[in-house]
Image (cartoon, rainbow, N blue to C red):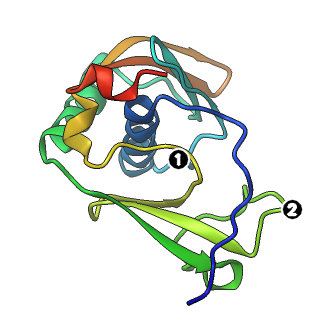
């Protein structure tokens, strides 16, 4: 059996908020045809994520984003990992953000059949553990749409650091 050696990870994300970020990225891609964000700040009390959008989403669209994420949470989608070699990254999985020094082995994170991406961060075991997703504020400035959100985990003590 081959051993998987991954790059070390220099962040200690809050797993429920980090997994919610995956759902949010995929929801934004599906709703607005944008790319995944390359500007995120994930924390226990407040997380921020920016998307390149030509126009500010409407109040109704913002409500739909939050509703979609909460539906995905309630769907209790499993979070699974697959270890693959760099040259075996599926064509439909974005890899342009991989650092040049990325290891030969990579970790593919799948959230049900909703989202698949390369990631070495910490995640919950299933979306239900995220609990509730709440958008606390949004802003739009020069083609950049920011979402500030918070999660209220089902098991808040499970991820005490």
- The number of discs equals 2
Q: CA distance from mark 2 to mark 1?
A: 27 Å
Point 13% across, 39% down: residue: 74
Which quadrant is home to the N terminus?
bottom right
Secondary element under disc 2, as helix, strand or loop, is loop
Horizontally, is 89 left or right of 110 in the view?
A: right
Horizontally, is 79 left or right of 44 in the view?
A: left
Q: Is residue 144 above or below residue 59?
A: below
* Residue 79 picture location, percent across and down: 33, 55
Point 32% across, 28% down: residue: 158
Horizontally, is 81 left or right of 86 in the view?
A: left
Check whether the beta carbons of the residues at disc 2 and disc 1 lie within 8 A of each other: no
Point 35% across, 21% down: residue: 58
* Res. 131 in view: yes
Horizontally, is 54 left or right of 99 in the view?
A: left
* Residue 128 picture location, percent across and down: 19, 39
Residue identifier under label 2: 101
* Residue 127 picture location, percent across and down: 25, 43
Q: Residue furthest bottom?
A: 1
Q: Quadrant of residue 81?
A: bottom left
Q: Quadrant of residue 16?
A: top left
* Res. 62 in view: no
Mark 2 Cα shell of 10 Å, populated few (<14), some (14-19), many (≥20): few
* Residue 24 picture location, percent across and down: 40, 38
Nearer mark to the viewer, of 2 and 1: 2
Residue 22 tag number: none
Point 40% across, 41% down: residue: 19
Which of the two discs, 2 and 1, labels the residue nearer the N terminus?
A: 1
Secondary element under disc 1, as helix, strand or loop, is loop
Residue identifier under label 1: 34
């Amino acid at each position: 059996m081959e051993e998987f050696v991954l790059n070390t990870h220099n962040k200690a994300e809050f797993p429920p908020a980090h997994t919610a970020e995956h759902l949010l990225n995929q929801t934004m891609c599906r709703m607005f045809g944008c790319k995944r964000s390359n500007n995120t700040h994930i924390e226990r009390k407040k997380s921020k994520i920016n998307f390149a959008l030509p126009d500010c989403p409407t109040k109704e669209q913002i409500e739909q984003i939050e509703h979609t994420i909460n539906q995905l949470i309630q769907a209790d989608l499993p979070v699974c990992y697959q270890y693959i070699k760099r040259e075996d990254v599926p064509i439909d999985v974005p890899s342009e953000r991989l650092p040049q020094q990325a290891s030969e082995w990579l970790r593919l994170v799948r959230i049900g059949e909703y989202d698949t991406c390369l990631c070495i961060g910490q995640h919950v075991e299933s979306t239900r553990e995220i609990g509730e997703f709440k958008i606390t504020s949004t802003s739009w400035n020069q083609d950049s749409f920011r979402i500030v959100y918070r999660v209220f985990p089902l098991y808040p003590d499970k991820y005490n650091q």
